[in-house]
Amino acid sequence: MTTLIQNGTLVTAAETFAADLLIEGEKIVEIGIGLKAPSAQVIDAAGKLLMPGGIDPHVHLDLPMFGTVSSDDHYTGHKAAAFGGTTTAMDFVVLEDQGFHYSVDLWMEKAAKAAIDYSFHMNLTRLDDRLASEIPALRDLGITTLKVFTAYNGRLRLDDGNIFRALRIARDNGMLVMAHCENGDVIETLIPEALAAGHTSSEYHALTRPGWGAVEATLHMAAMAEQAGAPVYIVHMNMAGEVDMLRYARERGVQVMGETCPPYLFFSVDDLRRPDGAKWVCSPPMRGREDNARLWEGLSEGILQTIGTDHCPFFFDGTKPILYEGKEIAIPGKELGQGDFTKIPNGLPGIQDRMPVLWTRGVGTGRITPNQFVAYMSTNPAKIFGLYPRKGALVPGADADIVIWDPEKRVKYGVAMSHQRTDYNLYEGWELKGYPEKVFLRGRMIVDGNEWQGRAGMGQFLKRKEGMVI
C-alpha cells in the first residue's frame, strides 16, 4: 500500500520544515515538497504537524503487585498509547527463579496481544555466577538493558558490589544499566516506625521515602558508573537535587542519563493528602513544588534526556466495574490499601496522557520547544535504546510510525477520553490544546480521530542493538 501525506509541517528533534511524506508498505521512502504518487492514498495535512510516533521507554503492563495486577495489559495499554501518539512502548520483564529465558518467554506470551511495537528491559533483581554468565545471551534476544534497584530490600535490591558487577558486564557487552534510585535502608527503617505511630494515610507513602535518599542514590549510582567505565540511565527522576546531581556528573564526563515522568512535573505530596490521595501513590512518590520547577528547568535546559511514563495503572476502586470496549471489567486496585498506605498498589496511569499533556503544558507554555518535545518523546529514547533511526525519526528507510498532530485542537481531557483501562485520570478536566489527529504504525493507520483501527497482535517485538550515550 502507498500513502502520500501532503502539505504537512515536519517537526524533528532538530528542525521544523514544510514537507510531504511518501510511504510504501511499512517504510517512509521519500520526503520532499510537491511529491506525486498517482496510485497513492492521499492525506492532506495542511495546518497539521508531522512527528515521529512517540516512544515510551518505561511502562509496566500486566504487572503482578500486592495480590492484584496492573490494569492495562499489552493490548489495552498499547491501544491507549496509540490514542496519545505513542507507537512504541518498552516494558520490564520480571526475573523469575527459572532464569532469563524463562522470564522473557513469559513476557512474550503476555505481549502476544500487542497493538503497537514493543521491546523489553530485564529487571536484574538478583545476581549470581550463573546469571552473570547468562547476561550476554540477552543480546541475542534483542534485550540490551538491565534494571537495578537501590531500594526494596530483600525483594528487588542488589547490593553495591553486584550493581558494580552488573555495570561492568554491561560495559563489556554493549548494554545499558537502568537504575531506580532511592535509599532502601532508610525506607525500611521509616515505614515500620510510621505504622507503629498509627500513620497509615497515603501521604506517609511519600514521607517514608525521603527525597534526599533519591538525591544521594543518584550521585552514588553515577559514581559507580564512572568507576566501572559504564553508562547508566536513571529512571523516573523526581527531585530537584537529582537534576543537580545529573548535571554535576555529566559536566564531569560521567556517562549518565536521566528520565523524568509527567506526574513529577505537575503534582506534589499535597495531592497525596487529598481524600482520594491513593490515586497519586507511586514509587518514587510525589515531591514538592520546588521539585516540579527544577525538573522543568532540567527539560528546558537539556539536562534530562527523556520523558517516560512509568505507566502502571490500577483501579482507584476495583470493587466497581467499568465498561471497556463494551464489556464490564473490575480489577482489585488501590482500595486494597484503605487504612494502610503500605498496601496501596504503587503506580499511575499515563501512557496516553504523556504527549498531549506535555504539548499543552510544555510546548504551549514555552517551557520546551516543539523540537525538544520530539526529542524527549521519541528521538532520544530511540537513540539511547538502540532503535534509531528505524524508530524516532521521519527519514527515508525509517518505519512509517507517524503522528499527524493538530496543534489547534482543543479537548477537555479526562477518564471519558482516555483508553487507559482504569477508573480515573490524573488530568481530569484539564483543557488541552494540541492533540493527535491520525496515528500510523509502520504505515498502517491505527487511530483516526476517535476511531480505533488497530488490533490485538499487530505489534512487533523489536530486537534492539547497542544504544547511544547522549
Image: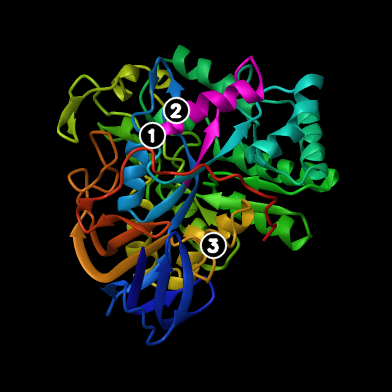
Q: Earlier in the sequence, mark 3 or mark 1?
A: 1
Whole-angstrom CA distance, mark 2 to mark 3, is 27 Å
Q: Which residues are magenta?
A: 89-112
Give left or right: position of 100 versus 297.
right
Nearer to us in this view, 193 or 155: 155
Location of mark 2 (residue): 110
Asked whether residue 397 is drawn in magenta, I would say: no
Q: Is residue 396 above or below residue 129?
A: below
The residue positioned 27% from the left and 29% from the top of the image is 316
Q: Is residue 93 above or below residue 10?
A: above
Secondary structure under the numbered disc 1 in the rendered image: helix
Which quadrant of the view contains residue 436? bottom left
Q: Residues within 10 Å of mark 1 (few under 14, many from 20)?
A: some
Whole-angstrom CA distance, mark 3 to mark 1, is 26 Å
Q: Are marks 3 and 1 in contact (CB under 8 Å)?
A: no
Three-letter amino acid code of the residue under disc 1: Lys
Nearest to viewer (mark 2 / mark 3): 2
Secondary structure under the numbered disc 3 in the rendered image: helix
Q: Is residue 459 above or below residue 386?
A: above
Three-letter amino acid code of the residue under disc 3: Thr
Is residue 72 visible to us here?
Answer: yes
Q: Which mark is residue 380?
A: none
Q: Position of residue 404 (x, y in %)?
A: 33, 67
Q: Position of residue 95 (x, y in %)?
A: 61, 23
Whole-angstrom CA distance, mark 2 to mark 1, is 7 Å
Q: Are marks 2 and 1 in contact (CB under 8 Å)?
A: yes
Q: Which mark is residue 113?
A: 1
